Image: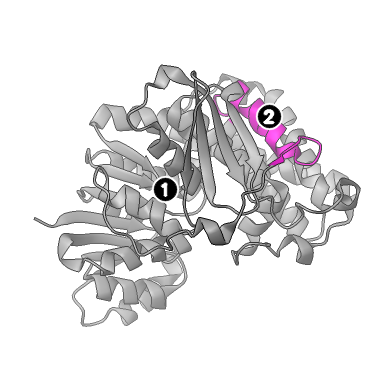
Amino acid sequence: MSRRISIFGVTGSIGQSTVDLIKRDMQAYDVIALSGGRNISQLARDAIDLKADIAVTAFDDQLDNLRDALAGTGIECAAGTQALLDAADRPTDWCMSAIVGLAGLAPGLRALRHGGTLALANKESLVSAGPLIMAEAAKYGATILPVDSEHSAIFQALIGEPRDAVERVIITASGGAFRDWPLENLKDATLKQASSHPNWDMGQRITIDSASMFNKSMETIEAKEFFDFSPDQIEVLIHPQSMIHAMIGYADGGLMAHVGPADMRHAIGFALHWPERKYLPVERLDFARIGQFEFRDACDHRYPALRLAREVMQAGGLTGAGFTAAKDAALDAFIAGHCGFMDMAGIVEDVLSALSRNNEHNMGDLTLENIRVTDQLAQKFAADVISARIA
């Protein structure tokens, strides 16, 4: 019997890697819904190739273009926020949540109601609403499987091991564009320099987040929320080869490491086939050719985003929602030339301080509506902070 699946965020890199795996075993899947943004040609091609029931674009002004692209195929078309939620309401056995940003949270919550598996690649869901999304999964008997390579590695390294024996969790980071730069030079880093990754070609925003370690700060918060680790158990270690994705240290001093190529199809395929392990078309590592692995400390002076992540974990509540909004606003400011590379962490810290002084924010429960309000409030504070820095 075919498994019913949906892919939200199909036109992004995670979505396209998921499509690649689905196409290799089409008879095993019944594709229900696909969603995308403005890349209508890709969304339409995927909907046709995977024989989806419905294709949804997040943008209302793209509905006519989507209809034209799918004319005569019999595939339903829809657009907008409500259409995304309606598509997520369609029952599935497995759903990929890969929409970027806070926009991915509500569809993911809806998909959990089917009691199936949610493959979670949307960082903001756990950072902004970890307790909410985990409680929703428990309520409906759904399973959440992590798709970030680091969190998939943690998940796999924990299989068969007693959780109370875990002492430490080590998440690795490539170090980004400036891992070999002297600390004193970082204040002068340019947008072009921050947008070039030493290991692979990624989008500009994720590449800059890698260089500032804001991407890794999000992942530490995700690890805390998904696995219920305490903040002081989670460590970040720079590993330039990007082949050891995470390590778990146990009470007997032993470490379980997950080692594999830097290919997101491994984490996606693991979530897709779990609890089985099936063949995946990824590189097989040749350790003799690799020769050695390198590790470096990820210090707070160089990467203040990691300190901020620990503070967010300690604060809990709606602080994660404020953090994600502030991080994005600071990144926008750097890209626009309104702040320096090392100023981004200061902007985020100022926004978090402003939020902590706001009584309405402090009193709010962790609900979807309050998360949205906090996101908007953080954006407002960020605009004020950035304007003050520019003046």
- Residue at image position (21%, 71%) is 51
| Residue 7 disc label | none
| Residue 147 disc label | 1
The image quadrant of residue 327 is top right
| Residue 355 disc label | 2
Q: Considering only vertical position in the picture, is 369 above or below 88?
A: above
Tell me the amino acid under the disc marked 2.
Leu
Q: CA distance from mark 1 to mark 2?
A: 30 Å
Q: Earlier in the sequence, mark 1 or mark 2?
A: 1
Residue 277 sits inside the magenta stretch: no
Q: Considering only vertical position in the picture, is 115 above or below 89?
A: above
- Total labels drawn: 2
Q: Which residues are magenta?
A: 296-319
Please name whichever residue, 313 or 37, is drawn nearer the observer in this view of the structure. Answer: 313
- Residue at image position (31%, 64%) is 21
Q: Considering only vertical position in the picture, is 39 above or below 309?
A: below
Q: Position of residue 147 (x, y in %)?
A: 42, 48
The answer to whether residue 149 is visible is yes
Residue 317 sits inside the magenta stretch: yes
The answer to whether residue 57 is visible is no
Tell me the amino acid under the disc marked 1.
Val
